Image: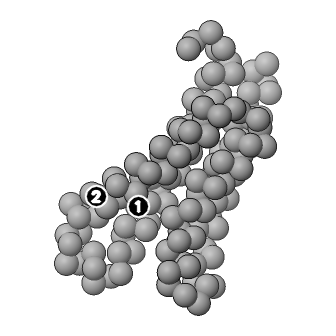
Amino acid sequence: MQNRSLVTTSIIMICTVLGAIMAAIAPPLLPDPTQQRALAIIATPLGTALGLLLTRSGWRPLSWTGCGYIWSLFIAAWLERRLVGPLFGGANQHSTYFNLVIVLEVLSGLAISAMVWQRRVQPHAE
């Protein structure tokens, strides 16, 4: 049971990291800045959701992915405002914000995969 749980967690983590890599590498290839920003925001949670769907983890972790996605947007905006200030954030086209979103979404995806692993190893922990 634990070996299968480790494989499940690994699949979710790999999909999350692949989504983040796609979000970080692909934007320069897109011509429109709006498409670049949309890809940077949505690629990582889609990778996490794909991993959850591939491992049939259920609807609960998918809802956690949605919550992590929404909260990462707000927390990244708050952090950008605190770390670099509103003037510098606008001057660099909010690149700090989009990098923070990717980092927070990766952390969220890894936390979700750890929670899925814990649920599979200890099914009576809920």
Q: Residue at x 40, y 48 (%)?
A: 71
Q: Are marks 1 and 2 in contact (CB under 8 Å)?
A: yes
Looking at the rendered image, the quarter that the C terminus falls into is top right
**Residue 14 image offset from top left, x and y in percent:** 69, 49
Q: Residue at the spot x=71%, y=46% of the render? A: 51
Could you tell whether 64 is left or right of 21 in the image?
A: left
Q: Quadrant of residue 95?
A: bottom left
* Mark 2: few/some/many CA within 10 Å (<14, 14-19, 20+): some
* Above or below: residue 40 compared with residue 54: below
Viewer-closest of 103 and 35 = 35
Expressed as whole percent of the image width and height from the top left, the position of residue 38 reads: 53, 71
Q: Is residue 88 left or right of residue 3?
A: left
Q: Residue at x 28, y 64 (%)?
A: 80
Q: Label 1: state its secondary structure.
A: helix
Residue 29 located left or right of residue 67: right
- The dot on residue 79 is 2
Can the viewer see residue 20 in this picture? no
Amino acid at the residue labelled 1 = Leu
Direction bottom: furthest residue: 31
Residue picked out by circle 1: 100
